Amino acid sequence: GDRSPFLTDSLLAVLASTHMAGAQLIVCEGTSATLEDAEQLVMDAIKAGAEGLILIPPYAERLSNSDTFMRLRMPAIALAGAQALPGMQTVRIDNRLAADQLASHLIDSGHQRIAFLAGPMEHGDSRERLAGFEDAMARAGLPIAPELVRYGRFSFQSGCDIGEDLLGASSAPSAVLASNDDMALGVLWVAHRAGLRIPQDLSLAAFDDTAAARRAWPPLTVANQPMAAMAATATQALLDCLTGDAGLPQGEQVLPHRVIIRRSSESVTAPCN
């Protein structure tokens, strides 16, 4: 599939945490993220000797609705999900609060026409981030123009496509909040190509804080997901279960995130809208 920087960061963090714990990591990669695909991945993992699962969206959401998975009673952790899911434990940040904080930062910088790039709606974190954006806009008394809420695929290409459309419109936004780094980088690429100055003509903020976000020019303002801490928490929960110290992992652990203001949105007064 389309391997995102977030997926790479997640994998490296889990690899590091399992290595530190002396556990072996078996990696199974899905193709279509359907329920059947998710169930097949679990069977493949079990055949390969896996005793516990660390799942990323949308596989966690898919399997939480699976009778086949529930019957297995396999210890599982949903990494970077958005809400409590039956049959597993979720390790996450407060996505809604983080999106609210990013949007509030843009509003406090003087922006009123802010576009929001949502991820796929089968991801719980996409829905939570959109809700956080709506919270901040409502609190500021700002209307959300329907044409400024767009739905992407968490991919660089979907960011480019939406960016072309948004920035080419006569009523272009003065700021964009993207649900992940990759889509924000797509918008940034389009903005550079159109000769827009960042942040003077367009401010950008995003989620995750992958290496790509830090290396972009200008570097992206982000809500940082603490991948190393999330992976360590997930690994420990599985080991506690497997060594008999705990029952099946359930409920959720919400880890603190950080909002990091960088050049993509720093100290700019937006034009009056």
Image (cartoon, grey):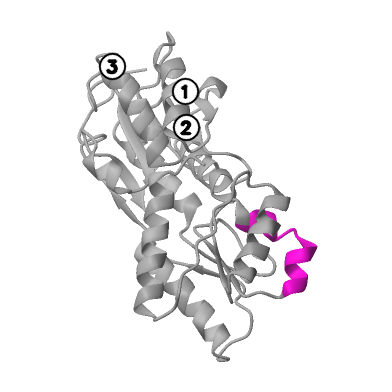
In this image, 13 relative to 201: left or right? right
Establish if 189 lies above or below 9: above
Q: How far apart are marks 1 and 2 (CA)?
A: 10 Å
Q: Where is residue 270 in the image (x, y as percent from the top left)?
A: 28, 24
| Residue toward you, 155 or 51 | 51
Secondary element at image label 2:
strand
Q: Mark 3 points at which residue?
A: 193
Task: Estimate the x, y position of residue 149 in percent, counting from the top left.
Answer: 53, 28
**Label drawn at residue 116:** 2
Residue most extreme to the front = 48
Q: Is residue 212 magenta?
A: no
**Is residue 204 in sight in this rendering?**
yes
Q: Which residue is drawn at 44% across and 28% down?
A: 157
Tell me which segment is drawn in magenta.
60-72
**Element type at marker 1?**
helix
- Quadrant (top left, top right, bottom left, bottom right) of the C terminus: top left
- Which amino acid, mark 3? Arg
Q: Which residue in the structure is indicated by mark 1?
A: 162
- For disc 3, the neighbor class at 10 Å (few under 14, some 14 to 19, many from 20) is few
Question: Residue 89: x percent and y percent?
Answer: 59, 70
For the residues carrying marks 1 and 2, which lies nearer the camera in this image? 1
Mark on residue 130? Answer: none
Q: What residue type is labelled 1?
A: Ile
3 vs 2, front mark: 3
What x and y, as percent, mark residue 133?
A: 48, 40
C-alpha gap between disc 3 and disc 1 = 14 Å
Which SS does the magenta portion mostly show?
helix
* Mark 3 vs mark 2, CA separation in Å: 21 Å
Q: In this view, does 132 lie above or below 92?
A: above
Asked whether, in this view, residue 45 is left or right of residue 211, the answer is right
